[in-house]
Amino acid sequence: MVHSLLPVLLASGLGASAMVIGLIEGAAEALALIVKVFSGYVSDAIGRRKPLVLFGYGLAAVVKPLFPLADSITLVTTARLLDRFGKGLRGAPRDALVGDLAPSTIRGACFGLRQSLDTIGAVLGPLLAVGLLSLFTDDMQKVLWVAVIPGVVAVVLLVTVVPEPEHQGQRPARLPITRGGLAKLGKRYWQVVGLGALIALARFSEAFLVLRATDLAVPLTFVPLVLVVMSGVYMLTAYPAGHFSDRLPRHPLLAAGMLALVVADVLLAMAGDYGLLFAGIALWGLHMGLTQGILASLITDTAPAAYRGTAFGVFNLICGLSLLIASVGAGALWQMINPAATFTAGAIVALLATVLAIRFGSMRHQ
């Protein structure tokens, strides 16, 4: 609910420019990915994943009330950064935990299922936002207050239901953060990191999908449907993509996902009506479904098990820097040229990532 309304709140309610929104979104997502380095490393060092996951979800729940209370860009930015800091704390330990528990023969399916379940909330949240905006006569503050509730419920469920697997405490490991230490992660792992960084560079913040909808005069009540469509396609494709990646080489699916992003960007650049707009948004979701879970599977495939949390953290740090560059650049192109320039540039980088995904085709999952 928050993510679907935040760009509108910043642009319409607080007067933020596209460049400012791009900077806020890029910085927030990059912060989350950078923090994952440290949370992943700590989870390896202590041999426990759940405490960091709980702290991360708890912090996100605590800061949610700041969004409806915000009366300035500064306060919204602070809340957004704290929210993403919590995401960073939980992200790498959670992904490492999935990697720890997933049998290698169905690893892709496990990560795909995690992505699909995670995205269900991204579908239901904007749908609820649409209904609540209609109920509350476009009062965004009231909708943002309702968004506090799921965060609290998530923390309660994590405390009362989710266990810490006993074997996690039996194999703590600290990877030296030196050139030699990082080399222990292996050449194949670093190849995946390089490809992931380029994919992140091609994929700027989804906030620009929302901005594109407002640019084409989509009514405020229906703006959250942008993320409903994107997340719905993502949700429906992530698990099948992961399932097939266990039976086929993973790289063709990655290449197909990036090709879908190329077409999505072209449609969004050309869009002059709602048909092309939502076709591009749907293809954006398809690219997410075909890439995000598979990249996580490749990290698990290639990184040593003892350093899995650190491996996810480093991967997300580098991808976070790429995402920051992409989002700031997207905002600059939007403001200085036009929206079409933003999506055209994204298509060019996505096409390069498609070619590299094919080139890395010699990689095979274990």
Image: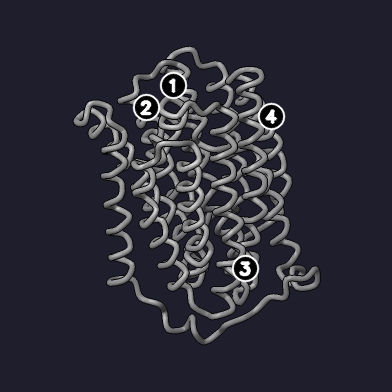
Looking at the image, the residue that sits furthest to the front is 71
- Residue 214's disc is 1
Q: Amino acid at mark 1?
A: Thr
* Marks 2 & 1, CB-CB < 8 Å contact: yes
What amino acid type is highlighted by mark number 3?
Answer: Thr
3D distance between C-alphas at marks 2 and 1: 7 Å
Specify which label sits upstream in the sequence, 3 or 1: 1
Location of the N terminus by quadrant is: top left
The answer to whether residue 120 is left or right of residue 46 is: left
Q: Which mark is residue 223?
A: 2
Given this view, does label 1 or label 4 mark the residue nearer the observer?
1
- Asked if residue 281 is positioned above or below residue 59 in the image, the reply reads above
Q: Who comes first in sequence, dot 2 or dot 1?
A: 1
Q: CA distance from mark 3 to mark 2?
A: 38 Å
Residue 243 seen in the figure:
no
Q: In percent of the image, x 57 and y 34: which residue is there?
A: 22
Return the mark for residue 291: none
Label 4 vs label 3, nearer the camera: 3
Mark with earlier residue (1, 4): 1
